[in-house]
Amino acid sequence: MDSVVGNEISAKTRLLAILGHPVEHSLSPRIHNAALRAQGVDAVYLAFDVTPGELPQAIQGMRAMRVMGANITVPHKQQAAKLVDTLDPVASKVGAINTIVSEDGRLAGYNTDVMGFKAALASVRPDIRDARCLVIGAGGAARAVVAALSQQGAKTIIVANRTESRALQLCEDAAQWGNSECVAHSFNDLTALARDADILVNASSIGMAETIKESPIPVDILTGHHVVVDLVYGPRPTTLVTEAVSRGAVAIDGLEMLLSQAAESYRLWTGKPAPTQIMRASI
Ligand code: NAP
């Protein structure tokens, strides 16, 4: 990888991208451009709003233009896993990717969300073996969360999703991932499930962007015994996190996970350990 002094864009500058829809809320351009600048890597990181129908063309375009790599975000993580040339073992298991690395024009898919979620969870609840875990959502991020919880030895993982069939599919797949019992639900019983959970993870899009004031569960059921990890992040702590903390719960939003998964994606693209302090300071 070429290095540059002063980070001037030239004809040799490589492109890193994030593909999502919506994507303008993403902090990834700030995090990665700060890291690239600090280490003098001759690349820029830009955000592209790509609709689900356009994703195959966007990924084909990455091949044609020899784009250095990309992050994949909501709602494309599962679809993108089917469009790359190879998958690393974690991404293959989870069936969703958040990172693409271009290796001589062939696109390799990785899932750094699994590692990112594990790091975020460990910062609030290192041992989850006896915990009853509720995951809200069954999309690409939820798949990474369930894989991480199962790797960490969670006894019971309950997946509740608006579209119940997606939760059922996730639990069917998770049966191959470890020894955790995975139980699928619709949103019908969500309040009772949340009341009974020890660890509550919001891996749905509720609370994101224009739904910032919404919470996936009625917040008045939260108590001091809950540990809440909201994957959603924004300019302010999410409503779920704010309300959980005000009721005595331990709660974090998606920023810790964002930083951890970003550090691993950066390492995959550049071969360099990520400058994590600079990444953190950038947001
Ligand atoms: P995705 O694959 O599109 O899945 C979205 C999930 O949210 C699905 O389960 C979907 O349910 C649910 N959902 C969307 N709108 C809803 C609504 N109005 N009411 C109820 N459920 C709704 O997206 P994803 O990649 O899994 O991402 C999910 C969230 O996690 C996003 O907010 C994303 O930013 C966040 N995330 C954060 C990090 C981080 O590092 N902090 C990493 C990954 C993801 P249906 O199946 O019924 O459509």
Image (tube, rainbow, N blue to C red):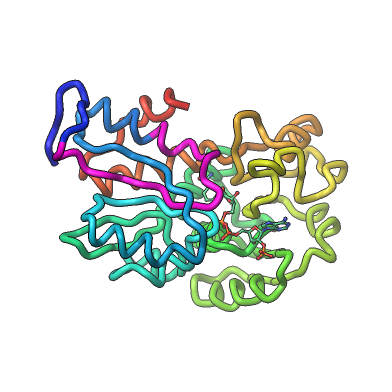
**Magenta stretch: includes residue 29:** yes
In the image, is residue 177 above or below residue 197? Answer: below
In the image, is residue 77 above or below residue 168? Answer: above
Q: Position of residue 120 (x, y in %)?
A: 52, 42
In which image quadrant can residue 15 be found?
Answer: top left
**Magenta stretch: includes residue 218:** no
Residue located at (43% from left, 23% from top) = 281
**Left or right of residue 235: residue 42:** left
Q: Quadrant of ligand 1?
A: bottom right
**Left or right of residue 219: residue 141:** left
Q: Position of residue 144 (x, y in %)?
A: 51, 59
Residue located at (20% from left, 26% from top) = 8
In the image, is residue 50 above or below residue 35? Answer: below
Q: Position of residue 224 (x, y in %)?
A: 78, 38
Residue located at (49% from left, 52% from top) = 20
Q: Nearer the viewer, residue 149 or 126?
A: 149
Q: Position of residue 51 (x, y in %)?
A: 51, 59
Quarter placement of the N terminus:
top left
In which image quadrant can residue 184 be found?
Answer: bottom right
Q: Nearer the viewer, residue 181 or 114?
A: 114
Give the magenta-colored segment's residue range.
11-31
**Left or right of residue 96: residue 135:** right
In the image, is residue 26 above or below residue 92? Answer: above
Residue located at (42% from left, 43% from top) = 47
In which image quadrant can residue 81 be found?
Answer: bottom left
